[in-house]
Amino acid sequence: MHAKLHIIVPTFNNESTILATIESLLNQTYKDLFIWIINDGSTDNTLLVLEQFESNKRVKVITKSNGGAGEARNLGIQKAKQNGAEYIGFCDADDFAHPQKFEIQMSVMSSSPNTDVVVTGEKYVASNYEPNCLPFYDVNTIKHNVISNLFEMLCNKNFNYHPASSLIRARLFSESARFTNHTCGEDYWLHLYLAAKDSVFRRVENEMYFSRQFENSLQRSPGASYYDGLARFSAINKLLSDEYNITNESKRLVLQEANDRFLRWHVSGARIVYPYTGSLVVCLKNFNNFNSKTLALIELSKSIINPIVRIVKQSRI
């Protein structure tokens, strides 16, 4: 259990993919690792699949009541730090890692001691994708670069890497630096916070993290922006609060602009997730949270006329 690297795998009803996920981690070329599987109240046969790892000394399964992926990851981080982890990595239970992923990331950490976080390239694959004939890399020739302007990028756009591909120094996690309990976007706060604290992120361009895509996933649903926008808007406001004392004026300006951007995500998503009254309530509730009252009025007008537009479109069909 006292490995240098600990990997956290939260799982909820992943009976069809969890085996391939864990095998991809056990088959890593980097061997000094330990895997924490946090079963977040699965109601399918996930636990039955995991029984085969009971005797494996590099795997520990912890079952808890359902609380979301963020809460599950936080529990795994807590256990990892209590057991001497120096580095903490992640893998979602329906994804898998290239066999050399963690060897390459640990090599980058070793060769660039000022680095706090190493992320990798990712590949989005079909839900039934089988990882055959993956390329083998010469670790010594792998290219990696510092991600510049990450703070601005997270405020203006989105991740340019899969957050679950991250390898993070364990000492960086704290009561502030942790995952949130949002339905979607629970990893945004952690990365925004670390970026705001000028942590050094490096990116390995090679595709090391493979994310399975499912048609019925929340992230691919039309209303995903409602949940993502809420997670980002909440994170922005949290960072702007007195508790975090962001005194850099340029950073505060970027955060204030991001406030309205992600609030628009949230409000526009509400028009998809909720019927007319519900979406209008969300808009009115957040009206005064907009820095720009012009944008607030635009979103309010859209929420008011949205059902009319729908009726007109349906009448033309």
Image (cartoon, rainbow, N blue to C red):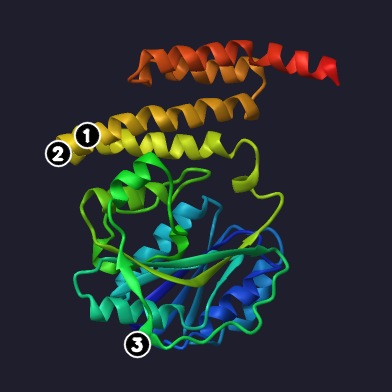
In the image: residue 297, left or right of residue 270: left
Tell me the tag on residue 140.
Answer: 3
Specify the amino acid type for callout 1.
Arg
Q: Which is closer to the viewer, label 2 or label 3?
A: 3
Cβ atoms under marks 1 and 3 closer than 8 Å: no
The kind of secondary structure element at disc 3 is: helix
Other-residue count near label 2 (Cα within 10 Å), few / some / many at <14 / 14–19 / ≥20: few
User: Three-letter amino acid code at disc 3?
Assistant: Asn
* SS label for mark 1: helix
Q: Mark 2 and mark 3 in contact? Answer it, CB < 8 Å.
A: no
Which residue carries the number 1 mark? 252
| Residue 175 in sight | no
Residue in view at x 32 percent, y 20 percent: 291
From this view, report whether residue 28 is shown above or below residue 37. below
Q: Nearer the viewer, residue 12 or 120?
A: 120
Residue 75, quarter of the rendered image: bottom left
**Residue 203 vs residue 103, the one in the foreground:** 203
Counting residues from the start of the chain, the first of labels 2 and 3 encountered is 3
Discs 1, 2 touching: Cβ within 8 Å: yes
Mark 1 surroundings within 10 Å by alpha-carbon count, few (fewer than 14), some (14 through 19), many (20 or more): some
Residue located beneath label 2 in the image? 248
Q: Label 1, label 3: how many angstroms apart (C-alpha)? A: 40 Å
For marks 1 and 3 on the same chain, the one whose residue lies earlier in the sequence: 3
**Residue 75 vertical position relative to residue 247 in the rendered view, above or below:** below
Q: Residue furthest right?
A: 317
Could you say where residue 175 lies in the image, as x and y percent from the top left? 27, 52
Q: How many marks?
A: 3
